Image: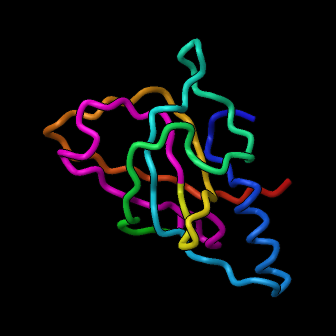
Amino acid sequence: MDNTSVITVVGRRKLCMAHTGEASLPPITRMAWGDGGLDESGQPKATTGNEVGLYHELLVKDIEGYEYIDDDQTSCRYTAILEADDLAGEEISEMGLYDAEGDLVVYRTCMRKGKEPDISQKYQMEEIFVPK
């Protein structure tokens, strides 16, 4: 797989179990940032869906909000803010979305993004369901 956002195996399992009625689906409540998303050559690691956490998690914060990004409400964008002093001087290369039970349900890697100490940054991650 490539380095775009991927719904993890845990996330897909929870969706399936909610559809059968065996479990309820916990909401996505937190976003995480880390610096472990690059391989030895400095390129984003390929995502597999088997990730259960970030490779090197630096910070987790509550989601600020969400919005549906299509008319039929099958894809959603989650937003969280890094305040000016959050992760100052760090280089972010991976992100994740956690549900209310603490499970990583969406994961992505990316090129390094430096965090300046005097600038807030708004991050958005999408949960996209693509038909096969």
Residue 17 drawn above or below residue 80: below
Instruction: Pick the quarter of the image with the N terminus.
Output: top right
Residue 7 position by quadrant: bottom right
Residue 107 locus on image (x, y percent): 60, 48
Identify the coloring. Answer: rainbow
Side of 41 where 90 appears, left or right:
left
Residue for point 65% across, 57% down: 128
For residue 93, side relative to residue 106 (left or right)? left
Q: Is residue 131 left or right of residue 89?
A: right
Q: Position of residue 79 (x, y in %)?
A: 40, 59
Q: Position of residue 55 (x, y in %)?
A: 56, 38
Residue projecting furthest to the bottom: 21
Q: Is residue 17 above or below residue 103?
A: below
Q: At 55% across and 44% down in the image, what residue appears? A: 54
Residue at horizontal 73 percent and vertical 60 percent from the top: 10
Q: Is residue 70 magenta?
A: yes
Residue 41 on image: x %, y %: 58, 12
* Residue 67 in magenta stretch: no
Residue 122 vs residue 97: left or right? Answer: left
| Quarter location, residue 26 | bottom right
Q: Residue furthest top?
A: 41
Q: How many marks?
A: 0
User: Which span is picked out in magenta?
Assistant: 68-96
